[in-house]
Amino acid sequence: MEIVIATQQHLRYARDICETIDKSAEDRGTGIAKRTPEYIQTKIKNGNAVIALDGDKFAGFCYIEVFSNKSYVVHSGLVVHFDYRKKGLAKKIKAKVFDYSKKKYHKAKVFGITTGLAVMKINYNLGYKPVTFSELTDDPDFWKGCQTCMNYDVLKRTEQKMCLCTGMLYDPNHKDKVKKHPYNKKVLSRLKRIKQSLFLKKKQNKKNTLLPLFFWKKD
C-alpha cells in the first residue's frame, strides 16, 4: 500500500473517488457535501490531496481546502474504498494529510466537521478538540459547501451555530496548553444521538405543524 501526495497522474481516479464518497455517506445514512470529479481534480492539480493506492487500484483519499486567507485548513472527503476497510487505512491517510498540512500551511488552524465517530477518534488522537462552530472559519465559501448536504436545513435553522456534525479544531498555537482527556466514544455517541433526536424531530414537527397536537403525543 502506498500513500502519497496526489499528482497529475492520479487525475483518472477522480470519478471513483466521488462515487465512493457518495456511496459511503448513503450507507451511513449521514449527510455530506457532494463534490464533482472536476472539483477533486482541481485539488489534485493544486497539490492539495493525498491518495492511497494498492498497485494501480484506488484504495483511499483525502483532500485539503484552505479558507480565511490561509488561516484555516480543513481536510475533506476522507474515504476508504470498500475493499480496504477495517485495516486502519483511514487513520494512515489522515495522519499523512495532517502532517502535510502542517508543513504546507504551518500557521493555519486545522479543523473539520463530521458525523462519523471513527473520524472523530482519529482527529482527537491527532490533537484536535471538539469546539463550537463559532470557533471555526466564518468564510462563506466553506459553509456554502454544506448546501448539498441532506442536513443543510438544520444548519440554516440554527443560524449556522450547530448541526448534526461535530466541529473539531487543531490550533498549532495552543497545542501545548490544552489538557488532553481520554477519548470517550460513549460520550460522543450520546452527543450524536441527542443531536439527531433534537434536530430531526424538529424537522418532522415542522412538516406537520398543521396537524392537531394530540396526534404527536405518543412521540
Image (cartoon, rainbow, N blue to C red):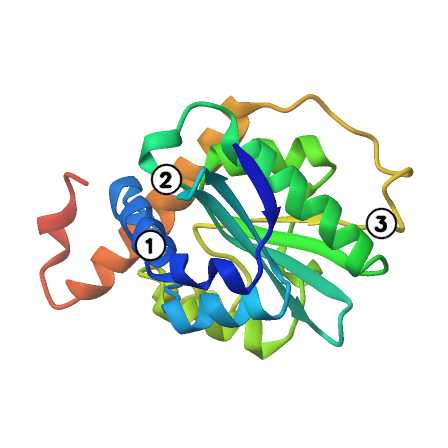
Name the mark on residue 172: 3
Q: Secondary structure at mark 3?
A: loop
Q: Nearer the viewer, residue 148 or 50?
A: 50
Q: Secondary structure at mark 1?
A: helix
Q: Which residue is mark 1?
A: 16
Three-letter residue code for mark 1 = Asp
Q: How many neighbours does mark 1 have within 10 angstroms: few (below 14), some (14-19), or many (20 or more)?
A: few
15 relative position to 131: left or right: left
Residue 30 at x, y = what percent? 33, 48
Q: Is disc 2 in contact with disc 1, using a CB cutoff of under 8 Å?
A: yes
> Between marks 1 and 3, how big is the CA–CA gap?
34 Å
Q: Which residue is mark 2?
A: 81
Residue 85 at x, y = what percent? 39, 29
Query: Where the C terminus falls, by quadrant?
Result: top left
Q: Nearer the viewer, residue 219 or 37?
A: 37
Reply above or below: 153 against 192.
Answer: below
Residue 10 at x, y = what percent? 48, 58
| N-term mark: 1 or 3 | 1
123 relative position to 99: left or right: left
Q: Secondary structure at mark 2?
A: loop
Q: Is disc 2 in contact with disc 3, using a CB cutoff of under 8 Å?
A: no
> Between marks 2 and 1, how big is the CA–CA gap?
9 Å
